[in-house]
Image (cartoon, rainbow, N blue to C red):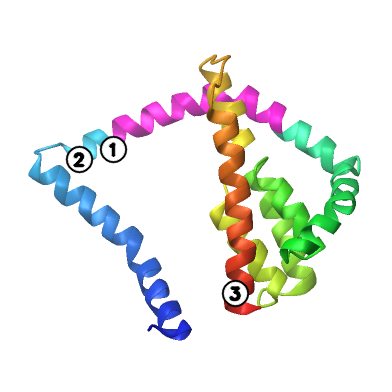
């Protein structure tokens, strides 16, 4: 059976080589398929810039709404109300703002994570927990507002429930794994 230290070393090694291996694979695959890699990259960058220009109004609206939510104190009130539930699953109450902010905004979640890490330390249980939440979550409502809004999709169908379920699973697994490994 693998020891926890060996598992951590394997995951650490895989995380170091994952992105360079992916880039290398894309270049090799493109070369085999005779794709003009640089031209395809530049064309994709042009399209990405155009998408960026189209989503700016939605981005501004989302960031203003999140700023009002945090500045108005709604985040702290919601964290206080939900803290009995978080205690049952092993999540410190201080991590709840991160769990609530991550589905809304990546930059807002990064700010919350920075505050928590500055307060509790990067190697603390809560510091590790919010770091794993940051990496395992998605900005579900941001994606819905920006990308669906920019292409005028009115009916999101199963995207909202699927995104919310994925966020909840990501948060629960983050809490469970961090408590299992570091708790």
Report the disc number at residue 101. Answer: none
- Judging by the rendered image, the residue that carries numbered circle 1 is 41
- Please provide percent x and percent y for residue 122: 67, 73
Q: Residue at x 24, y 34 (%)?
A: 40
Report the disc number at residue 180. Answer: 3
Q: Residues within 10 Å of mark 3 (few under 14, many from 20)?
A: few
Q: Residue at x 60, y 61 (%)?
A: 174
- Please provide percent x and percent y for residue 114: 71, 61
Secondary structure type for disc 2: helix
- 50 drawn magenta: yes
Q: What span is colored magenta in the figure? A: 42-62
Q: Majority secondary structure of the magenta segment?
A: helix
Whether 71 is drawn above or below 46: the answer is below
Q: In the rendered image, is residue 125 in sight? A: yes
Could you tell me which quadrant the N terminus lies in?
bottom left
- Judging by the rendered image, the residue that carries numbered circle 2 is 37
Question: Marks 1 and 3, Cα distance to the nearest angstrom?
Answer: 42 Å
- 57 drawn magenta: yes
Whether residue 76 sits left or right of residue 127 in the image: it is right
């Amino acid at each position: 059976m693998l020891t926890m230290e060996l598992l951590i070393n394997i995951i650490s090694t895989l995380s170091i080589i994952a992105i360079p291996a992916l880039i290398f694979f894309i270049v090799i695959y493109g070369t085999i398929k005779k794709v003009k890699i640089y031209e395809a990259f530049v064309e994709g960058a042009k399209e990405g810039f155009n998408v960026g220009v189209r989503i700016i109004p939605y981005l501004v609206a989302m960031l203003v709404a999140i700023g009002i939510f945090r500045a108005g104190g709604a985040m702290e009130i919601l964290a206080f109300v939900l803290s009995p539930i978080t205690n049952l699953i092993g999540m410190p109450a201080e991590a709840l703002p991160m769990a609530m902010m991550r589905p809304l905004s990546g930059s807002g979640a990064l700010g919350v994570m920075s505050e928590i890490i500055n307060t509790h330390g990067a190697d603390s249980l809560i510091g590790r927990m919010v770091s794993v939440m940051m990496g395992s979550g998605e900005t579900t409502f941001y994606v819905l507002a920006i990308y669906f809004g920019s292409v005028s999709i009115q009916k999101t169908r199963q995207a909202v429930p699927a995104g919310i379920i994925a966020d909840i699973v990501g948060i629960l697994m983050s809490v469970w794994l961090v408590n299992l490994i570091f708790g």
